[in-house]
Image: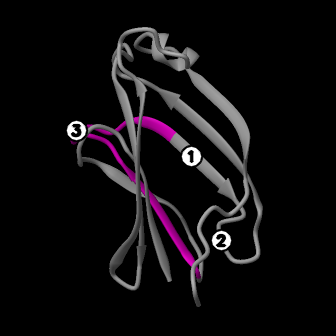
Amino acid sequence: MFGLIFFTLFTSGVGEFLCTSSDLEMSYTFCDSTAHAFVFNLTPCSIMKTKVWKATLYWIPRSDITFLKIVFHVWRNGERAFNWKHLLCSGADDEYSLCEMLKGETLVEEFDIKGLRIQFLK
């Protein structure tokens, strides 16, 4: 079974499972212990024989977004198989529109995630 720790924003804190299937567990965590208005949906919740996923993101930030870092950890049989970090917002010359969002604004995005970039053995 694969475990995918999805969306670690800043450092560890409150989080929850997003989906669970026979080959995938996906969860997220935020940096603090306060609940967030955040939903991420991935369809299908599986990585086997899947090349395109439909994703939906809904988020109401509790503060202005000036710094935002996303960290992906993929675990396989209890060991880290993949680690990816990306700084989305640094506060200067950011290319993503969400980097200018203000506290309380609503972000709703639907997008496709295409192509399996990592081949895992069964």
Dot 1 amino acid type:
Phe
Dot 2 amino acid type:
Ile
Q: Nearer the viewer, mark 1 or mark 2?
A: 2
The answer to whether 22 is drawn above or below residue 31 in the figure is below
Residue 33 screen position, x and y as percent: 21, 42
Start and end of the magenta stretch? 23-38
Dot 3 amino acid type:
Asp
Q: Nearer the viewer, mark 2 or mark 3?
A: 2
Residue 49 screen position, x and y as percent: 76, 76
Q: Residue at x 58, y 34 (%)?
A: 58
The answer to whether 87 is drawn above or below residue 104 in the figure is below
Earlier residue among tags 1 and 2? 1
Q: Residue at x 59, y 90 (%)?
A: 122
Q: Which residue is mark 3?
A: 32
Earlier residue among tags 3 and 1? 3
Front in this rendered view, residue 106 or 64: 64
The answer to whether 1 is drawn above or below residue 71 in the figure is below
Residue 115 highlighted magenta (yes or no): no
Q: Which residue is mark 1?
A: 40
Q: Which residue is mark 2?
A: 47
Q: Residues within 10 Å of mark 1 (few under 14, many from 20)?
A: many
Residue 114 screen position, x and y as percent: 74, 53
The answer to whether 100 is drawn above or below residue 98 in the figure is above
